[in-house]
């Protein structure tokens, strides 16, 4: 472990999104999306992931997932840039922020659909997972995946607009010098790793069995958004997370047990300490691809925020 | 190059999909009905194996229950489709459908209620009316978390099957398929076995049953049972 700085540690972030093994076999584009704010010149970092439902009733859910991470990033960025992000989130995390997220996502997908209507376009061929190209590591394994399957199906008529067409889950993390914040709607996992290296769920995992999930497309979806704000004031240093992980459900569903998934968080933390952030950035995409192939077969988006341990 | 040694996380596994055949072996099934049922289920095995090959991230586990005077496991225990074989059923007795559902409920109760298991698929095949406490059996089934989430399909064989009872089982009249002759029974059984294809796909919020793909009854499918 590299150490030696007595200043409050900054946060750094990394993430990857990969097309699932089943989707590769079935020639389906990745439905997950990722946004990584690096935080290099800011006193904060944040990351977002989203999982488009991918069912026949949700043909544009890849775009819905991309919209979910985009609007969340915009909203979080504004809050974190404000004078009192901790106060703002404390005041708004339970009602105002969830309502704003629902409203902005619904506005965004409605606008996307109106664009399709106006342009006479059935379905844009989205970047896999709606990745922001400059936000993920250039060696990410996903950037070319969708191009392997570019024989378009004959376009059926554009269905009438409904939010369900774009249905998606959402998870986000933000960290500053004095708090960490997590937000989740639907399935997926938010995990905290404590200074002793142990991993725990930051928000309780979904209790839905099978493929059911809550979604941004639901009526009053804001009511299903769960949040957690942990102050970093030194009052309980053993419980102040030193790394945070969010992932879409394809990651945890790849392991036999929940403990096996938590071990993934603990292992990534150990590898981070031993090898630095660059090592995680280089390898995360490959790990996720391997995990999907040997586990759930689902797309996986995962993102990490950790205390910068550079000297 | 990725190091296996450094691969984060514990033991991995594909997702489990539990498939149940629930077959009526009462006396009225004797003759062509039970023969066709045996033939059709045997015919589904290669297709289900093919589906399993195409999707190694879902393990298809098959069980079968038979019911007449009582209910019993015909294929006990979760059998991987790769090892699944069908032994012909024979007919005789009454229609203890409620007991069959209770037997399935007991098995579903044993399944871990984790998010990574896929919804079970239950396919009920019958030509008659329950002669026991059907409601008790259905209540037992629906009291289990997986019973509620299961994809429940009923195939009514012939004109005497009580479709109102089967609608209670499926909760959706579109999933009560009326097989009025042997050809339709074969088509419906084959279609029911393909539901695993959608259920096994990793699609959150998906409706696993594409009812538009249910075989259509044509004028050639005249009623003969």
Image (spheres, rainbow, N blue to C red):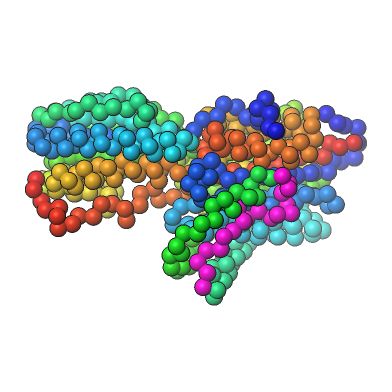
* Identity of the residue drawn at 83% across and 52% down: A42
* Identity of the residue drawn at 59% across and 61% down: A105
From where the camera sits, is residue B42 visible? yes
Query: Image quadrant for the N terminus of chain B?
Result: top right
Task: Give the quadrant of residue B63.
Answer: top left
Q: Is residue A127 magenta?
A: yes
Q: Is the magenta stretch mostly helix, strand or loop?
A: loop
Asked if residue B203 lies left or right of residue A284, the reply is left
Q: Position of residue A244 (x, y in %)?
A: 70, 40
B183 shown above or below B38: below
Q: What stretch is highlighted in magenta?
A: A120-139
* Identity of the residue drawn at 42% across and 35% down: B53
From where the camera sits, is residue A199 visible? no
Q: Position of residue A89 (x, y in %)?
A: 71, 54
Q: How many marks?
A: 0
Query: Image quadrant for the C terminus of chain B?
Result: top left
B14 shown above or below B188: above
B72 shown above or below A249: above
Work out whether residue A60 or residue B32 is closer to the camera in this orientation and state it.
Answer: B32
Q: Position of residue B135 (x, y in %)?
A: 22, 39
Task: Give the quadrant of residue B40.
Answer: top left
* Identity of the residue drawn at 68% across and 52% down: A35
Q: In the displayed image of the protein, which residue is found farthest to the bottom?
A: A118
Asked if residue A52 lies left or right of residue B28, the reply is right
Q: Position of residue B224 (x, y in %)?
A: 8, 48
Asked if residue A94 lies left or right of residue B123, the reply is right
Q: Is residue B98 magenta?
A: no
């Amino acid at each position: 472990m590299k150490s030696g700085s007595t200043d409050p540690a900054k946060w750094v972030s990394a993430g990857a999104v990969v097309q699932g093994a089943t989707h590769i076999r079935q020639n389906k584009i990745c439905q997950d999306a990722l946004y990584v704010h690096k935080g290099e010149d800011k006193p904060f970092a944040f990351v977002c992931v989203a999982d488009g439902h991918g069912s026949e009733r949700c043909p544009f859910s890849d775009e819905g997932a991309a919209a979910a991470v985009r609007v969340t990033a915009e909203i979080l960025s504004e809050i974190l840039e404000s004078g009192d992000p901790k106060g703002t989130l404390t005041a708004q995390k339970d009602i105002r922020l969830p309502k704003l997220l629902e409203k902005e996502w619904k506005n965004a997908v409605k606008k996307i659909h109106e664009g399709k209507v106006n342009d006479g376009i059935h379905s844009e061929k989205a970047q896999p997972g709606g990745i922001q190209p400059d936000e993920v590591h250039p060696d990410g394994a996903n950037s070319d995946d969708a191009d392997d399957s570019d024989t378009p199906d004959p376009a059926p008529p554009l269905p009438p607009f409904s939010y369900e067409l774009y249905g998606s889950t959402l998870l986000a993390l933000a960290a500053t010098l004095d708090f960490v914040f997590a937000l989740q709607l639907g399935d997926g996992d938010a995990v905290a790793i404590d200074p002793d290296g142990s991993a725990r769920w930051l928000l309780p995992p979904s209790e839905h069995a099978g493929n059911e999930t809550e979604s941004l497309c639901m009526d009053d979806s804001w009511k299903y958004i769960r949040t957690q704000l942990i102050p970093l004031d030194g009052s309980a240093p053993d419980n102040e997370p030193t790394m945070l992980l969010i992932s879409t459900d394809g990651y945890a569903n790849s392991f036999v047990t929940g403990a096996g998934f938590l071990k993934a968080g603990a292992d990534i933390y150990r590898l981070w300490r031993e090898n630095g952030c660059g090592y995680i950035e280089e390898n995360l995409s490959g790990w996720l691809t391997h995990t999907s192939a040997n586990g759930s077969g689902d797309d996986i988006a995962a993102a990490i925020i950790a205390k910068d341990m550079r000297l | 190059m990725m190091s296996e040694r450094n691969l984060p996380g514990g033991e991995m596994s594909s997702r489990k999909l539990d498939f149940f055949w629930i077959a009526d072996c009462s006396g009225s099934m004797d003759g062509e009905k039970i023969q066709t049922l045996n033939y059709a289920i045997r015919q589904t095995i290669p297709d289900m194996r093919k589906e399993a090959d195409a999707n190694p991230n879902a393990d298809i586990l098959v069980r079968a229950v038979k019911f007449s005077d009582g209910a019993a496991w015909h294929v006990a225990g979760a059998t991987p489709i790769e090892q699944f074989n069908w032994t012909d059923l024979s007919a005789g007795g009454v229609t203890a459908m409620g007991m069959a559902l209770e037997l399935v409920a007991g098995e579903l109760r044993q399944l871990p209620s984790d998010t990574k298991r896929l919804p079970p698929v239950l396919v009920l095949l019958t030509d008659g009316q329950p002669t026991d406490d059907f409601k008790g059996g259905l209540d037992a089934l629906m009291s289990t978390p997986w019973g509620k989430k299961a994809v429940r399909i009923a195939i009514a064989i012939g004109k005497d099957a009580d479709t109102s009872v089967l609608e209670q089982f499926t909760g959706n009249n579109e999933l009560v398929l009326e097989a009025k002759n042997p050809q339709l029974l074969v088509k419906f059984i084959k279609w029911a076995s393909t539901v695993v294809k959608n259920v096994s796909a990793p699609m959150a919020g998906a409706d696993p049953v594409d009812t538009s793909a249910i075989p259509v009854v044509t004028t050639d499918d005249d009623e003969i049972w």
